[in-house]
């Protein structure tokens, strides 16, 4: 397992990729309250500029779609919705979002059902990776063989 500090800025994102899945992450960029909606309640947590907003695509998909989800949270302050366990939509969620100072990828949780933002559903290939937000980027640890890290530009909407 490896550890790597990845420098990112406002115009770049971290891309973690395995054979069949990926994770896209960026810093929150500013301080704001993030509301989390569950079946029973709403609560808010404060995101700091160095915190992470991450989108996991356990079965792959579009990096641009993942970027749009990041922007809906960090730019437009879209609340996160947490589904009850065994909700039918969990099987169809292609992308899942998490935000906080530290995020741990896990392949043992049900997609979209975990209200604690330090856990994010991933593929088995990427389970155990830990992301820690810093002022200059993201510290990534627990990187297994076969998983690549890179810095990509923020996609264009054009």
Image (spheres, rainbow, N blue to C red):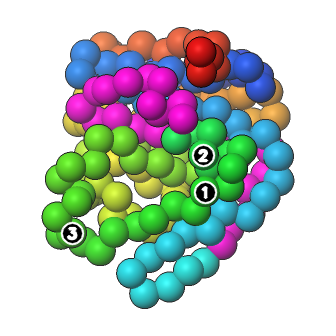
Query: Which x, y percent locates residue 125?
Result: 26, 29
Label 3 and label 1: CA atoms lie apart by: 21 Å
User: Which residue is located at x 34 percent, y 48 percent?
Assistant: 121
Disc number at residue 8? Answer: none
Residue positioned 40% across, 38% down in the render: 56
> In terms of sequence position, does the residue under pointer 3 or pointer 1 come before the other?
1
The residue lying toward the viewer, choosing from 4 and 151, is 151
The answer to which of marks 2 and 1 sits earlier in the sequence is: 2
Let me know if residue 140 is in the magenta part.
no
Q: Is residue 62 magenta?
A: yes
Split into 4 quadrants, where in the image is the N terminus? top left
Instruction: Evaluate if marks 2 and 1 touch, with contact meaning CB atoms under 8 Å apart.
Output: yes
Q: Secondary structure at mark 3?
A: loop
User: In the rendered image, is residue 116 in sight?
Assistant: yes
Q: Which residue is mark 2?
A: 72
Q: Which residues are magenta?
A: 44-68
Residue at screen point 73% across, 56% down = 47
Position of the C terminus, as image quadrant, is top right
Q: Please determine whether, in this image, residue 115 is positioned above or below residue 49.
A: below
Residue 78: mark in rendering? 1
Asked if marks 3 and 1 touch (Cβ < 8 Å), the reply is no
- The crowding category of the residue bearing disc 2, from other C-alpha atoms within 10 Å (few below 14, some 14 to 19, many at least 20), is some
Which label's residue is closer to the chain start, 2 or 3?
A: 2
Residue 48: percent from left, percent from top? 79, 51
Residue 87 tag number: 3
Disc 2 to disc 3: CB gap under 8 Å = no
């Amino acid at each position: 397992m490896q550890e790597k500090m990845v420098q990112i800025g406002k115009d770049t994102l971290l891309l973690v990729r395995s054979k069949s899945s990926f994770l896209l992450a960026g810093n929150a960029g500013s301080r704001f309250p993030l509301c989390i909606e569950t079946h029973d309640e709403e609560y808010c947590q404060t995101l700091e500029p160095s915190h992470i907003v991450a989108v996991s695509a356990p079965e792959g998909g579009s990096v641009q779609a993942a970027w749009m989800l990041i922007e809906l949270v960090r730019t437009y302050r879209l609340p996160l919705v947490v589904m009850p366990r065994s909700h039918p939509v969990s099987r169809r969620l292609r992308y899942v979002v998490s935000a906080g100072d530290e995020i741990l990828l896990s392949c043992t949780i049900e997609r979209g059902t975990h209200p604690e933002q330090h856990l994010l559903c991933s593929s088995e290939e990427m389970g155990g990776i830990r992301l820690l937000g810093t002022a200059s980027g993201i510290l990534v640890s627990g990187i297994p063989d076969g998983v690549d890290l890179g810095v990509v530009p923020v996609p264009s909407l054009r």
